[in-house]
Amino acid sequence: MSKIREIISVLTVSIFATIAATSCYEPSDSMVFGNGEKLYVVEGRVTDADSMATVVVSKSVKADGEGDCEYVDDAIVWLRDDKGNSALLENSGKGVYQTSEIKGTVGTRYLLTVEIDGQNISSIDKMPVPAYADSIVVEYKDSYTIFDTIGYYVSIYSTQSDDTLQYYRVEVEKNGKKLNDYSSLWLFEDTHLSRVFKMTIPHNFVEGDSVVVGICSLSEPVYEYFFGLSKQFKTNFSNTQPPFTNPVSNLATSDSEAPPLGYFLASSVLKFSFVITNNKRTVVVRNLDAISEENPQLF
């Protein structure tokens, strides 16, 4: 019996799941099974910031990029939480399954189960506490690194409230469009030596840009999945770089011959919304009010 099923049998936990990643997963050559048979991919997310829990079900494409993504619209997707709530997600086309019946709550454990062609895929994730982010600082720089251009750069300042290790993914929208996805996963964890940690988003903005920064708390298995996924888009400029391998998923499957692809996460999200002004330095605090000019008392 898998670890996930043991947890289910002990806690009688129910299901919940969900986020919808928008692209098909591409397994690496080293993980292609048999004759390149397509594998099911599940990408799910539930947060305390979204009204809908969402799961996307698709089939993998080859690592060489050949073939089109195939979405699966005949799966049975259930979401439950450890409070006894459950919901059957409704398919809206292109592999997207959603429900508004179960809400994201910090500290709640969620279970996702997906049934496809006699195969059962499941995962459990517990929603961590929100990020300890004090503020965001927007500063004009002639350049951030030798590879970046002039413009405004956004830095996140976070602090540790205790010694508990926490993991985060930063998602950014610029002018209503998502700025970073799988190819640019901005991840960090709070094992900083000092009590204050600074992360600068590696993208320059211009005056007038509308920006939304979401700091998503992650469980360790989900963080490790995204960290492994990020390695597929990076090179260390070394001829000894190891071959790419699929990141370790936090999904379990009844099919022992094909390990599951994808992920399921429950995340609390701390959001900051602001517009880039012509101030050389602007501080955006938790109440989303902008303070122009330098205010060193915040740090």
Image: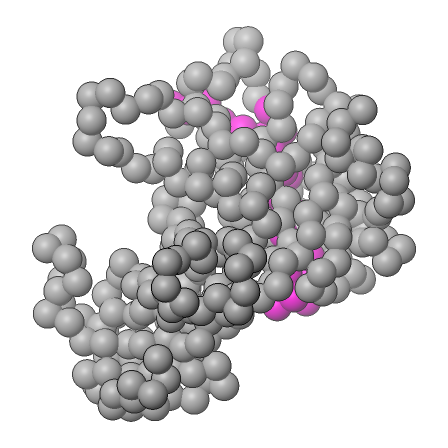
**Is 83 positioned to the left or the right of 148 in the image?**
right
Q: Which quadrant is the C terminus positioned in?
A: bottom left
Q: Is residue 30 visible?
A: yes
Q: Quadrant of residue 103?
A: bottom right
Residue 86 in the image: above or below residue 113: below
Which residues lie in the magenta part?
39-64
- Where residue 11 sits in the image (x, y, percent)? 86, 45
Q: In the picture provided, is 264 more to the left or to the right than 188? A: right
Identify the residue at image location x=42%, y=83%.
285
Counting from the top left corner in percent of width and height, residue 120 is at: 77, 29
Q: Position of residue 217 (x, y in %)?
A: 55, 58
Q: How is the image coloured?
A: one colour
Single out the residue that lies furthest toward the top: 34
Displayed quadrant of residue 203 = bottom left
Residue 50 visible in the displayed image = no
**Residue 147: image x %, image y %?**
13, 53
* Magenta stretch holds residue 262: no
